[in-house]
Image: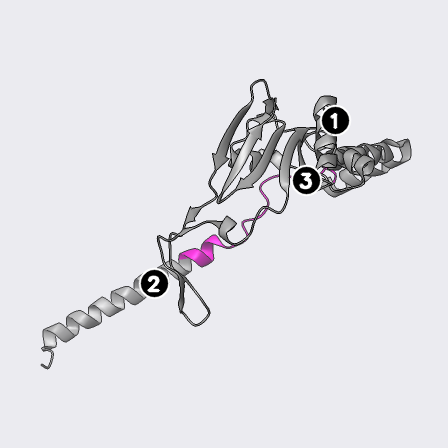
Amino acid sequence: MPMRCSETHDTLRSEVRRILTLAAILWSVGTAAQDIGRIGPVYPIAEPSLLDVILAKLRDAESSGALAKMQRDTQARVKRSIEQPAPVTAITKVTKARSFYYDPSIVVPYAITDADGRLIVAPGTRVNPLDTVSLSKQLLFIDARDPAQVGRAKRILDERGGRLKVILTGGSYLDLMRRWKQPVFFDQQGSLAEKLGIRHVPALVSQEDRRLRIDELL
């Protein structure tokens, strides 16, 4: 429908007001951006560069030998942490023998398919890894800081002709590896012992059918 004359005038007046308002805003911004001169005295920055301060401290530390000492101390700490990791504090020495079982079965929460989308394992299926892979060697958890546990581990190791994996919860695995001439492992942060429910050592882990048997040895 064609606009009436009065509507056309109203539209024009509205457009003119919008243009004037925009011009006023632009003018005020331009005025605010003008150089209003210097209000007070200006001084150069007196603080030294942070980078220059750090470099100067490093040069002083190098000349005094402190930097070399810091490097040696760091290397020694790293070496100690590698050769003798932090012990698992939650695990203590056996005071009473006990035996229990661990079932490694899991329930698959979702469908597992191959690359073509064909179903391999349906959701809700109970899977036991021992059906596919057996425990090839018994596992013996010990604290190598206790000479009695180390001696017992060596006897069991010899009795089984080396078919035993020794896993430490404390002490130096590298020291035992050098003495025994065979691999020795360390349970970092006690993650494996916690999963199996081991709270005391020495503890021997072996397979019985589709479960693992754990014997905490007195």
Label for residue 151?
1
Looking at the rendered structure, the secondary structure element under dot 3 is strand
Magenta span: helix, strand or loop, mainly? loop
Q: Is residue 45 visible?
A: yes
Scheme by which the image is coloured: one colour
Give the spatial CA distance, label 2 vs label 1.
91 Å
For label 2, the residue is 22
User: Which is more N-terminal, label 1 or label 3?
Assistant: 1
Observer able to see residue 57 = no
Q: CA distance from mark 3 to mark 2?
A: 86 Å
Q: Percent from the top left, x then y, of residue 5?
A: 11, 77
Helix, strand or loop status at disc 2: helix
Identify the residue shown where x is 12% and y is 73%.
7
Separation of marks 3 and 1 at Cα, in angstroms: 14 Å
Which amino acid type is shown beneath numbered disc 1? Gly
- Going by the numbered disc 3, the residue's amino acid type is Leu
In this view of the protein, which residue sits in the foreground, 38 or 101?
A: 101
Mark 3 vs mark 2: in front: 3
Residue 42 falls in image quadrant:
top right
**Left or right side of 13 for 47:** right
Q: Are marks 2 and 1 in contact (CB under 8 Å)?
A: no
User: Could you tell me which secondary element the residue under label 1 belongs to?
Assistant: helix
Which image quarter: residue 19? bottom left
Label 3 sits on residue: 164
Q: Is residue 130 left or right of residue 63?
A: left
Left or right for 80, reference 217 = right
Bounds of the magenta segment:
28-48
Nearer the viewer's eye, disc 2 or disc 1? 1
Q: Using the rendered view, name the quadrant where residue 52 is placed.
A: top right
Q: What percent of the width, then of the height, locates residue 14? A: 21, 67
Q: Residue at x 26, y 64 (%)?
A: 17
